[in-house]
Image (cartoon, grey):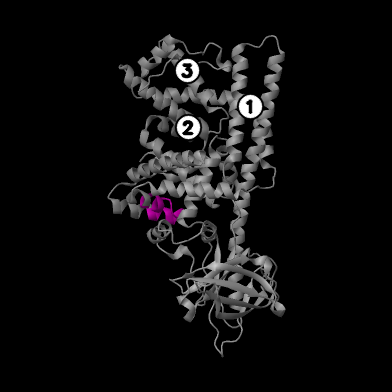
Amino acid sequence: MILPTMADTSPTPEATSRWAMTPEALDSLLGLLAPEREAAGRKYEEIRRRLLRIFEWRGCPYPEELVDETMNRVAHKAADGLELRAADPFRYFCGVAQLVFKEVLRENRKKQQAMAEIRRSEVPPAADEEDDHEHLECLRQCLGELSDENRELMMQYYSGDGGRRIKNRKTLADRLGVGMNALRIRAYRLRARLEECVLECAGAK
Amino acid sequence: MTTTDDGRVLRRYLLDDLPADERDALEVELLADGDAFQAMLAAEDDLLDDYARGTLTGADREAFAAHFLARSGSAGRIAFARGLQAIGGEPTAAASDGPVTAERRPASVPWSERLSAWLGGLVPAPALRLAVAAAAVALVAVAGYSAWQTAALHRQVARLEASQQQLAGERADLARREQQLDRELAAARRAAGELRASDDASSDQLAAASRRIEELEGEVTSLRRLPKPRRQEITVSFLLALATRSSGVPELVLPDAADTVSLQLQTGDGAYYDSFQVRLLGAGGAEVWSRTGLAATAATGTVDVTLPAELLAPGRYEALLEGVGDDGGSELVGAYELQLVAAPPRPTEPDLSSPRRP
């Protein structure tokens, strides 16, 4: 496992202020997450990954930079002697992330209003049959590479909508003898694998 | 039970529809709990599928498009969702509503059988495969047509047209995203130009500006390269049975919205031929369309052809099915007369807002 280093947290021009990551700050942050460095590194990466998604779900334009900003600020607080209660570490990260988000929102409010206007305008569509066909072929190929059980799970899990979809999934979970949560995680991971496979295949063509 | 056990809460979060305090509390849970985070990722996939399927409408659709399309890689994920639905047989137009249908859409076949058929390559050609994935309306050629059949046809075409509109919406969303990226790229280039002209710009700032331009250019290229939602073809199929003395000339209704017409010609006693050709003759015996090198479908005992609907104006036609021998000589296997009529205008919806007359 590759542990975070200074290269991973190199400051962006916007963060050349007091929140720029330093080796001491990074060490303090890792120490905050776990006593053992490798475990701390894993937690660091997982928190980064989740924060990135949260910023994306919030609709932030530059989620990577906002994650960096959040981690940098927590690291500096850690270097200043911050102690987190065992039950609280994520609450603190979230609090800082929410603060960073509010700052970005304030700065970009006008730009966001303009973007919202642009999104509302109508534009004539375009189509590319060849790309469509290639993409579908890649998906078929990738589905063919799954085991029969996984392929059937994928097709049944994602079939239908609304109430019918929920019913399909309950039936599937009963048949496989697993809980809904386990089924959901398995389906999500299979789908992620398929999406990667299709991207690679389409890129190769 | 935690917040993330409730699928409705997850959807509301993704659609930016939660009060601020609930949203903040949920985000702490997402960061702290791996299962909760996975549940949110899975909920996003479901929302994406609903968006691609067209069941996400109105303000929800706008909210999802506004956030989701802004992310890099979103066009690819939408294309993936559409592909998964196409292979699963969705969205599907309904099969004909009554007893006169000759063939049913794949939607009524169990998932496992449909998947096996696909993997077994039972649908021969890519173009025909796409047509199967697209909406299809099937009618048996019978003498005359009833008002009931016409109404059923109109309902099916209306559903297909709704599906077309949904695809048009998706294309518009992608096009808006492309415009937005173009604007951001232009702004980034202007900013980089100003930095270069300025005496105060640091090398870090210039490098960051160049990185930003490269990122945006990459996103634009990816977005343009990825498949766009294509308009679904509307195919109307007719089964042409070998005529008997009493059967008369069948009248076949051709909707305006049809893109292609599929004819299934019964081979009857001519089934022993390996190769067939079909000629379609119009008024005065003039050849309107022809195709050679055809094979019969064993399962249905028919030779199946598809031709553009625009070739067929209302009128009398004769389809000739000829078996082709090894020596290249042909023998007439069947002749099928048909009368194509345009679909009558769609009945207007009654105005329920106006008071009834006494």
> Residue beneath label 1, please?
A108
Q: CA distance from mark 3 to mark 2?
A: 18 Å
**Please, what secondary structure does the residue beneath circle 3 have?**
helix
Task: Tell which of B167 and B282 is nearer to you.
Answer: B282
Work out which quarter of the rendered image holds the N terminus of chain B and state it. Answer: top left
- Residue type highlighted by circle 3: Thr
Mark 2, other Cα within 10 Å: few <14 / some 14–19 / many ≥20: many
Q: Is residue B228 above or below residue A101?
A: below
Sequence-wise, the earlier of marks 3 and 2 is 3
Magenta-tinted stretch: A152-168
Which of the labelled discs sits on residue A53, or is there none? 2
Classify mark 2: helix, strand or loop: helix
Along the polypeptide, which appears first: circle 1 or circle 2?
2
CA–CA distance in space, label 1 to label 3: 24 Å
Chain on which label 2 sits:
A
Which amino acid is tagged 1?
Asn
Q: Quadrant of residue B163?
A: bottom right
Can you say whether B305 is above or below B79 in the image? below
Quarter of the image with the C terminus of chain B in it? bottom right
Chain under callout 1: A
Secondary structure mostly seen in magenta is: helix
How many neighbours does mark 1 have within 10 angstroms: few (below 14), some (14-19), or many (20 or more)?
some
The amino acid at mark 2 is Arg
The residue labelled by disc 3 is A9
Circle nearer the viewer, 1 or 2? 2
